[in-house]
Image (cartoon, helix red, strand yellow):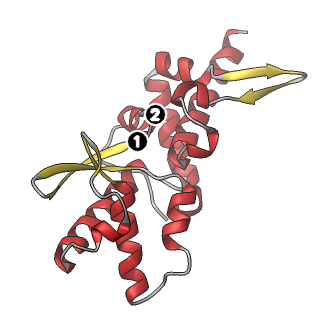
């Protein structure tokens, strides 16, 4: 299970996961002379890349998909499709996919593969350290009949289905801190 990175302060981790439109992590991986960054994926993309691919050539295909989906530079995706990543040498593919997986550990936690309690604790600490940001993000709710509805799309500017698990985690930490502050003030 992935744990929050210990070398990132809680406030930095909180702000990292609140990045719009998607969290990203810089990497020293270079492809074709272009400096690239790792962009977090929403769960559907991760599952699509991994579906039915477990060993041998399938693992190679999975690496190509992850590289194609996560590597970006200032102009956009480095590879348009996984087939474009097939042109990489084996060592190049391994280097870029390893960099992608390390970056995803930082900017793309997934509920099913992380220590949720530890991530939540660190994100709560981060939200407490950034009260103004937490209030803006935590205020993205909609009042309905007898209840409130989560509206992180108002902060991130995209469809709910496009949010990464990490974005949901940071949003829920902000809501928790905001609600706690409102309770203390009342």
Q: Earlier in the sequence, mark 2 or mark 1?
A: 2
The spot of residue 127 in percent (x, y) is 49, 28
Q: Are marks 2 and 1 in contact (CB under 8 Å)?
A: yes
Q: Residue furthest left?
A: 33
In this view, 98 is above or below 148: below
Q: Residue furthest right?
A: 146
The answer for how far apart the CA atoms under marks 2 and 1 are is 7 Å
Residue 93 in which image quadrant: bottom left
**Count of marks, rendered view:** 2
SS class of the residue under badge 2? loop
The spot of residue 99 in percent (x, y) is 26, 62
Q: Quadrant of the C terminus?
A: top right
Q: Residue at x 17, y 77 (%)?
A: 91
Q: Residue at x 57, y 29 (%)?
A: 174
Depth check: 120 or 27 in front?
Answer: 27
Depth check: 6 or 102 in front?
Answer: 102
In this view, 185 is above or below 33: above
Which circle marks residue 62 in the picture?
none
In this view, 186 is above or below 63: above
Q: Residue furthest top?
A: 186
The spot of residue 73 in percent (x, y) is 24, 45
SS class of the residue under badge 1? loop
Q: Is residue 63 left or right of residue 185?
A: left
The spot of residue 131 in percent (x, y) is 49, 19
Label 2 crowd bin: few (<14), some (14–19), many (20+), radius 10 Å: many
Label 1 crowd bin: few (<14), some (14–19), many (20+), radius 10 Å: many
Q: Is residue 108 left or right of residue 184?
A: left
* Residue designated by label 1: 23
Which circle marks residue 18 in the picture?
2
Q: Is residue 19 left or right of residue 155?
A: left
Q: Residue at x 43, y 25 (%)?
A: 129
């Amino acid at each position: 299970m992935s744990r929050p990175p210990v070398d990132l302060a809680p406030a930095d981790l909180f702000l990292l996961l609140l990045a719009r439109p998607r969290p990203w992590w810089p990497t020293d991986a270079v492809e074709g002379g272009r400096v690239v960054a790792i962009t977090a994926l929403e769960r559907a993309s991760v599952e699509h890349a991994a579906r039915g691919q477990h060993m041998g050539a399938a693992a190679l295909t999975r690496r190509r998909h992850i590289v194609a989906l996560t590597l970006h530079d200032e102009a956009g995706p480095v590879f348009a499709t996984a087939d474009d990543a097939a042109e990489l040498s084996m060592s190049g593919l391994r280097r870029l996919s390893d960099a992608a997986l390390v970056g995803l550990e930082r900017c793309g936690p997934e509920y099913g593969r992380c220590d949720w309690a530890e991530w939540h604790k660190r994100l709560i600490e981060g939200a407490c350290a950034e009260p103004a940001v937490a209030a803006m993000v935590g205020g993205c709710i909609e009042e309905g009949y007898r209840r409130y509805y989560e509206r992180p799309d108002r902060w991130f500017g995209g469809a709910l289905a496009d949010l990464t698990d990490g974005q949901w985690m940071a949003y829920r930490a902000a809501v928790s801190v905001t609600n706690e502050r409102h309770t203390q003030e009342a």
